[in-house]
Amino acid sequence: MRMNTRNIAIFIILVSFVFVYTIHINWKQKKELAAYSHETEVYEKHIDELTAKLNECTERKQQWGIKFENEKKRATDLQTALDASRSAAKKSLSDSSDQVRQSNERVVDLESQVKQLTELRTGLERENNELKKRQQERVANDSDALVLLHKQLERALASEKLLQKRIDALEAMSRPISRTNSTTKLLLINATQPSTVNIVANQTTRTGDNNTTENLNNMTLSTTNSKFKQSTVSGTRAVHSAGASNIESSSTMVLRPPPP
């Protein structure tokens, strides 16, 4: 009986210990479960935040991926444009080099032409100075020749006046009124370049009543070439029909250039 009671007491104690231990374990588990539940909520909340951040990062990643693709495409286009510009620059540089070379050749040609033109201009100026000098000499010679012709003309006019006086005397003796035309012609011949100079002197004398006389003189000088040189003069003179009303006096003079 005592053994049964003792066993029952031990059994009851063991059952009580198991019950208390079970309650303790359950309480501990509930406490841990509550702690785990709280941590789980915290973790879930944190997971939600991280998920939101992950979604945001994913969206940003997609946007940055699109931007990266656009920038990559832009960089490719820029590289293509850069290559094209580089090729164009090389071609332009090559063309510029060719143009510079052609310009240098043209400059050399122009310098050669300028040199030739300068030499030609110098020669032309020299020839022009020589021509001016010759022209001045010819003008001086022509002036001397004209002076000589003027003197010859004055002599011819003096001869004509003397002849006219004789004709007037003869006409006065034969007729009361007379009219006389006298013409002197000079032929000038240049040996190298023929030229003719005609000097025509017309003198008309009228004799009226009371033995009054009126002399009208007219002189004409004409030439086919005024460029002749002065030289010695030789000639002949002839008088025709000494008693006629019209008397013509002609003189022929030959101008020859002086010996070289």
Image: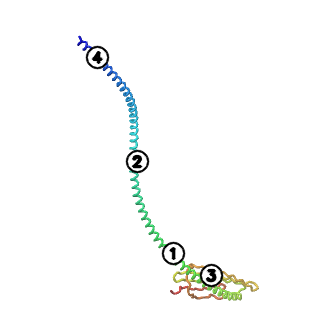
**What number is the disc on residue 13?**
4
| Residues at marks 3 and 2 touching, judged by CB atoms closer than 8 Å | no
Q: Residues within 10 Å of mark 4 (few under 14, many from 20)?
A: few
**Residue type at the position of mark 2:** Leu
- Would you call the spot at circle 3 few (<14 residues within 10 Å), some (14-19), or many (20 or more)? some
Of mark 4 and mark 3, the one earlier in the sequence is 4
Quarter-of-image position of residue 159: bottom right
Q: What residue sits right under mark 3 in the picture?
A: 200
Q: Nearer the viewer, residue 237 or 139?
A: 139
Figure quadrant of residue 157 = bottom right
Task: Give the spatial CA distance, label 4 vs label 2.
Answer: 91 Å
Separation of disc 4 and disc 3 at Cα? 192 Å
Instruction: State the separation of the CA atoms marked 1 and 2.
Output: 66 Å
- Disc assigned to residue 78: 2
Distance (Cα) linking label 3 and label 2 = 102 Å
| Badge 2: residue crowd in 10 Å (few <14, some 14–19, many ≥20) | few
In the image, taking residue 259 as reference, residue 215 lies left or right, namely right
Question: Badge 1: how crowded within 10 Å, few (<14), some, or many (20+)?
Answer: few
Question: Which structural element holds mark 1?
Answer: helix
Q: Earlier in the sequence, mark 3 or mark 1?
A: 1
- Mark 4 and mark 1: Cα distance apart in space: 155 Å
User: Of marks 4 and 1, which one's residue comes earlier in the chain?
Assistant: 4
Q: Give the percent coordinates (x, y) of residue 214.
A: 72, 83
Callout in the foreground (4, 2): 4
Mark number, residue 238: none
Taking the image as shown, residue 259 lies to the left or right of residue 21, namely right
Numbered disc 2: secondary structure: helix
Q: Nearer the viewer, residue 9 or 251?
A: 9
Give the residue at mark 1. 125
Amino acid carrying mark 4 in the image = Ile
